[in-house]
Image: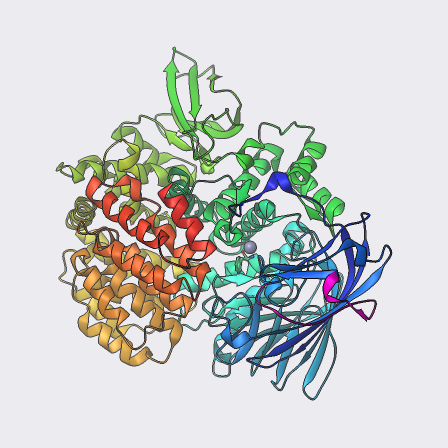
Amino acid sequence: MDGTIRLADYRAYPFTIDHVALTFRLSPGATRVKSLLHMAPTAPNADLHLDGEELSLISLAINDSPLNKKEYSVTPTGLTIAASAVPTTAFTLSCEVEIAPNANTALEGLYMSNGMYCTQCEAEGFRKITYYPDRPDVMARFHVRIEGDLPVLLSNGNPAGKGEGWAEWDDPWPKPAYLFALVAGDLVATSGCFTTRSGRNVDLNIYVRPGDEDRCDFALESLKLSMQWDETAYGREYDLDLFNIVAVDDFNMGAMENKGLNIFNSKLVLASPETATDTDYMRIEAVIGHEYFHNWTGNRITCRDWFQLCLKEGLTVFRDQSFTRDVRLGPVKRIEDAATLRARQFREDQGPLAHPPRPDHYREINNFYTVTVYEKGAELVGMLKRLAGDDGYKTALDLYFDRHDGQACTIEDWLKVFEDTTGRNLDQFKLWYTSAGTPRLDVTEEWDGDTLTLTFTQSTAPTPGDPTKAPRHIPIQIGLLAPDGTEVVPTTLLEMTEATQSFHFPGLSERPTASILRDFSAPVMLARDLSTADLAFLLAHDTDGFNRWDAGHSLAKTTLIAMTTGADPSDDFLTAIGGLLADDSLDPTFLAHCLSLPSDDELAQAIFASGKTPDPDAIYVARADLARKIAQTHQTRLEQLYDATEVKGPYSPDAHSAGQRDLRRACLGLLSHIDAGHRAQALFDSASNMTDSLAALTTLIRHGRGAHALEQFRERWKDNRLVMDKWFMVQVGACPPKDAIATAQALAEDPLFDWKNPNRFRSLIGGLVANHAGFHAANGDGYAFLADWLIRLDPMNPQTAARMSTSFETWRRYDATRQAHIRDELTRISQTRGLSRDLSEMTQRLLG
Ligand code: TRP
Ligand code: ZN
C-alpha cells in the first residue's frame, strides 16, 4: 500500500536458477541484453515473477517458444508469467531487452562514466539491466558475453575467450544478481600476481583511465596485503584465477565487492604522494581490504534478504578494522573506531533515523546502508568475540564458513553458529540486532575497607516504533589501578544481563581507581561521575589505551562545555595536556589524538544529551579559545614538537611517518592560534606532499588567511578531479562560520562545480555541513542551501540526494528558531512534485 517492505513477509522464491547466460550488445543509447535462464520450479502452481525497471521488452520465450501476450503481464516494476504458462519441470526462459546506459544518471544498473560502461547492482540495480528475480537468495552461475568496440571488456569470474569486439566470462561460483558486474572501456591495467597458500596463482589487475596508471601501485600492494591477511587471520583463500579492480569517477558509494570484479570510486584507488593524503592512503588500504574480505563474508556466504545486510557488512567492517589494526595502526585503531561510532552512530541512534542493525521494515533499502548497519554491526561482532574469547571466535567462524558456504543466510544462522560452538544461549544478545537505541550505562562505586563494589544500571531511551526496552547482554571490560598507577586487577570481562547488577572486588589493600569499559567493550554511553582529578589520573596512568585517551577526551569535553557558558578553561585540563606533552614514550598518533579537541558536532551532541540546547556559535568560540589557551600555556613544547616531527626525505605513507605528520599537524593547528599563520604559510610554500599541503591550507583558511594559497592550489590542480574535490571541501568546511554560506554559494557558481558528480557534490554540500556553526546559521540560510540542492539533485541521483539529507538528522537538538527553519525546509522538500522514493522516505522519517 504505502510500499513498505517487511521482514515478516519474507517468502522463499518458488524457482531455482541453475545457470544464467547473458549477452550484451553495447551501445550508449540502445544496449541490447539477452538472457537465458535455466530454471526449475520448487513449488507447484506458482506465478513466475521477475523484477524489471526502465526496460524495453523485445522478446520473451519459454523453452524457445515465444509467450503470447495473454500469458504474461508487465508493470513498471516487473513482469509476471501466469502459472498456467510455466512448465512443471526444468525449463529455459529467454528474454531480450533494450536499455539506455547514457541516460542513466542515477548510477545504478548499467551506466556510463567518462565514456566507459560500468555497473552498480547492489542493492536492486540488476533489475534495471534485465528481467530477473533480483533478490539475494536466488543464486546462480553466470556466463557473460560482451560485444562492443571498446578495448577492455570485463565481467565476473574467469576469462572464457575473447576476440575482435567481444569477450566472454564464466563465473563458476553461484551468486545473487547484486554481485553481477560489467565494465567496458578504454582502460589500462597495473598488474601483479598473488600465490595463494595452496599454491594457486592469481592474476591481479587495477584498471584505470589512461593517465591515471601512475597512481595505482599502492592499491595493488594493498590488495596483496589483504589477500595475505585473510589467509593468516581467517584461513580464507581466494577462489578464482583472476581478481580485477576498476576505478570509476562517478560512483555513489565507496566501492563494491562484485565477484572477481570489484568496482571502486576512483578516490579509493588512485594515490600518489603529491595528490593523496595519509588519510587517503589509509582509507584506500582499508577499503581494498573491505571489498576483498567480502569475497567470503558477503559473496561465498551472502544474505537471505536485505534486512540481513549487517550479516555481511557488520562482519566485513569488523574484519577490515582488524586488518588495519594488524597491518598499520595497532591499538590506536580502536580509538579511531570507537570515536567514529560515538560521533556518528550514537548521533543516528539519538535522532529520528534510529533503526536496529537489523531493521524489520523499509521503503527503500538504499536508505539503510548506514553507520548503524555497518559500524554498529561491526561492534556486535566484536562483542560476540569478547564473549566467545579469541579461540571461541575462531572456532565459531570456522563453523560459519563450513556450514554456510554457498548459502544465503540470516542473523539467526549467524548467532546459531556461536550458540553451537560456545554452548551459550544468545536470545538476549540478539536484542542488539533487533532493537534500536544506545544503552546508557550508569555506574556507582562503593568502598568498604577492602572490597570495591561496582553497580551498573542500564537504560535505553525509546526509539521510533519501539517504546519499551528490555535489558541487554553487555560485556563490560574493567581494570583496577592502585593510587601509584600500577594495575591491581588486570583487564577482566564482566557480563551484565540485568537492568541493575553489582560486581564485587574483595581483598584490596587500598581503594583503587576503576577503569571501566576498557577497549570500548560495548557500544554504550558510559555515564560516570568522575572528578577532573580522577580523569587526569586515568589520562596519566591507565594501561588501557582506549580508556586513557577517553579520559583526556572527557576532560576536554567537560572543559569546553563549561566554556560555552562563560567559564575559564580548567587548569586540570591544561596541566594534564602538559603531562602528555612531556611524556616522550607516547606513540605520536596517540598523542595527536589526545591533542585534537572534540568536534563542534560532538559537543553539540553532549550538550543536548545533558538536557540543554547547544549554541553553535558559542561552541565554535569555545573551541578556538581553548586551542589558543593550550598553545599559550605550552608554546615552547609545542614548537619543539613541531620541529622535531618534521619528516625528512621522500614521502612514504607508512604508519610511522604518518604518525609523525599527525602529531605535527596537531601542533600546527594549536600554534596557528598564536603565530599569525606563519608556520602554516611556510609549510604550504615548502610542502612536497598532499598531506602537508592540505594541512597547511586548512590551517590558513581556518584563520581567514587562505585566499592566496587557494588560488595557487587551484592553478596547480585544476585538472585533477580528486584534488579539486579537496579544494571545494576545505574552503567551505574550514572557513570561519560567518563566511561559510557565502563561500558555498560562490563555489556552487564555479565552472568546476560539476554537481552531477557525486564526489564533487559531496565535497561542497558535505563541506558546508561539516562547518557546524556555518551550516547552523541562525537565519536558516545553510538549511535552505542544502534543501535547494537536494531538490535539484533528487531527479538525477536519488541515492546521493537521500544520503545527504541525513545532514538534517540532528535538528531536534537546536533552539526553536533553528528547528522551525529546518522543519520548513524538510516540508518544502517533502512537497516537491515527483520526489523519489529514496528522498521521500528520508524526509518523512526526519520529520517523524
Ligand atoms: N556493498 C558495498 C560495500 O559496503 C556498498 C555499496 C557500494 C553500495 N555501492 C553501493 C550500497 C550502492 C548501495 C548502493 O562494500
Ligand atoms: Zn561492505
Image quarter where the C terminus lies is top left
Residue 600: x %, y % from top left: 26, 47
Vertical placement of residue 284 versus 598, above or below: below
Task: In this rendered view, identify the residue nearer to me: 642 or 35.
Answer: 35
Instruction: Pinpoint residue 231: horizontal percent, then vertical percent.
Output: 67, 55
The stretch in magenta equals 53-70
Please say if 776 is above or below 661. Answer: above
Please name the residue shown 27% across and 74% down the image.
750
Give residue 291's quadrant in the image: bottom right
Q: Is residue 241 magenta?
A: no
Q: Nearer the viewer, residue 680 or 441?
A: 441
Residue 429 position within the rendered picture, expressed as x and y whole percent measured from the top left:
57, 30
Please name the residue shown 68% across and 60% down the image. Answer: 73
Q: Which residue appears at 70% of the width and 44% of the height?
A: 400
Picture quarter with the N terminus: top right
Residue 158, image quadrant? bottom right
Number of labels in the image equals 0
Q: Is residue 724 visible?
A: yes
Furthest-right residue in this view: 89
Q: Is residue 519 left or right of residue 380?
A: left
